[in-house]
Amino acid sequence: MADGLQLSFADTVERTAHDLAGMSGVDLAQEGPATVRLWEARGLALHHLAAGDMDEALKVMEAARDSCPRTRKQNPNQPRTAAKETP
């Protein structure tokens, strides 16, 4: 492949992010930076999964969840850490 036609890994991940978002009906050109970063993390995680590295894919998604305010909500299935009232 000619040097001008070869995509860098970052370009490949960005393209994957746009493709994934498009399949979900999201146009990243119209979204804010936080949404774009989240989709790029999903694209990167997908590449790690394709390479067989589940641990790295999970790390990428955990970091993305921690940086996005919409995804920081506590899982309702996890026990709460607050003290409970006793009868």
Image: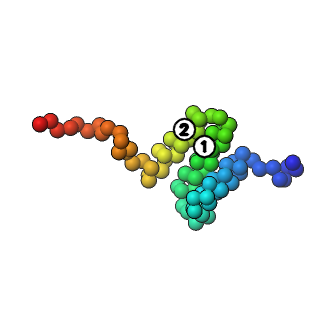
Q: Is residue 65 above or below residue 25?
A: above
User: Residue type at mark 1?
Assistant: Ala
Across and down, in percent, residue 73 comes to: 39, 48
Element type at mark 2: helix
**Residue 17 placement (x, y as % from top left):** 63, 53
Dot 1 and dot 2 residues touching (CB under 8 Å) = yes
Q: Nearer the viewer, residue 63 or 57?
A: 57
- Residue bearing mark 2: 58
Residue at far bottom of view: 30
Q: Which residue is mark 1?
A: 45
Q: Taking 64 as reference, is 85 left or right? A: left
Residue at (42%, 47%) from the top-left corner?
72
The numbered mark, 1 or 2, whose residue comes first in the sequence reads: 1
The residue sitting at 29% across, 37% down in the picture is 81
Name the residue at 71% across, 51% down: 11
* Residue 14 visible in the displayed image: no
The crowd level at tag 2 (other Cα within 10 Å; few <14, some 14-19, many 20+) is some
Helix, strand or loop at mark 1: helix
What quarter of the picture does the C terminus occupy?
top left
Amino acid type, residue under disc 2 in the picture: Leu
- Residue 12 position in % (x across, y down): 71, 49
The quadrant holding residue 86 is top left
Foreground of the two, 20 or 34: 20
Neighbor class of circle 1 (other Cα within 10 Å; few <14, some 14-19, many 20+) is many
